[in-house]
Image: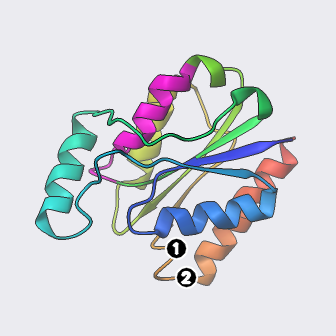
Amino acid sequence: MKAAVVYYSMSGNTQFAAEKIAEKLGADLIRLVPKTSYPAAGFKKFLIGGRDALKAAEPELEAYAFDAEKYDLIIFGMPVWASSVTPPLRTFIRDHLTEIGDKKIAAFSCMLGSGGDKALAKLQGALGIGAFAAAMTLIEPKSKTRAENEAKIDAFCKELEASE
């Protein structure tokens, strides 16, 4: 099964998890980068990022390579902003929803506090699917590399491999 990990990362937590998942599954990495960066720190980070997440914004993205025909499995990765889907993922979904409609879909979220399950539920809704092939929420996987996060990533990958 050929997989792609499509992700957005601001602080590196989602990228850290995406790279681990891609390595374990032999998946391609597709990083989404908005043309206009979000503030990376301070009050503006939460104000602007949270506002855009709640408004379901779809920012313009830097160019990336994605050919849905190459993949059987699409894994989405995102940080949790206001318990919602991050705007760059919304843009990707808008641009590729019809192409990925028949693919197996999995997802993971990375958070500092809470809202991961709500964000994943909203992602399910944005994709129009009933359930993910696998889903997980991680708490600060890069900065707090815990055995629990490592075990979750392993279990997530094993669940996807078993569903082939």
Q: Position of residue 148 (x, y in %)?
A: 60, 77
What residue sits 44% from the left and 28% below the top?
A: 126
Q: Position of residue 29 (x, y in %)?
A: 65, 52
How many numbered discs, if any? 2
**Mark 2: amino acid:** Thr
The magenta span reads 81-97
- Could you tell me if residue 147 is visible in this image? yes
Q: Which mark is residue 141?
A: 1
- Which is nearer the eye, 81 or 64? 64
What residue sits 65% from the left and 64% below the top?
A: 19
Query: Is 12 situated above or below 32?
Result: below
The quarter of the image holding the C terminus is: top right
Locate residue 38 relative to residue 101 in the image: left or right. left
What SS does tag 1 mark?
loop
**Mark 1: amino acid:** Pro
Quarter location, residue 23:
bottom right
Q: Position of residue 55 (x, y in %)?
A: 22, 34
Locate residue 93 relative to residue 59 in the image: left or right. right
Residue at which label 2 appears: 145
- Distance, label 2 to label 1, CA atoms, is 5 Å
Coloring basis for residues: rainbow
Secondary structure predominantly adopted by residues drawn in magenta: helix
Q: For the residues labelled 2 and 1, say whether their Cβ atoms are less than 8 Å apart.
A: yes
Q: Which mark is residue 3?
A: none
Q: Is residue 88 magenta?
A: yes
Query: Is 93 situated above or below 158?
Result: above
What residue sits 74% from the left and 38% below the top?
A: 73
Locate residue 128 relative to residue 131 in the image: left or right. left
The quarter of the image holding the N terminus is: top right
What SS does tag 2 mark?
loop
Q: Position of residue 119 (x, y in %)?
A: 40, 45
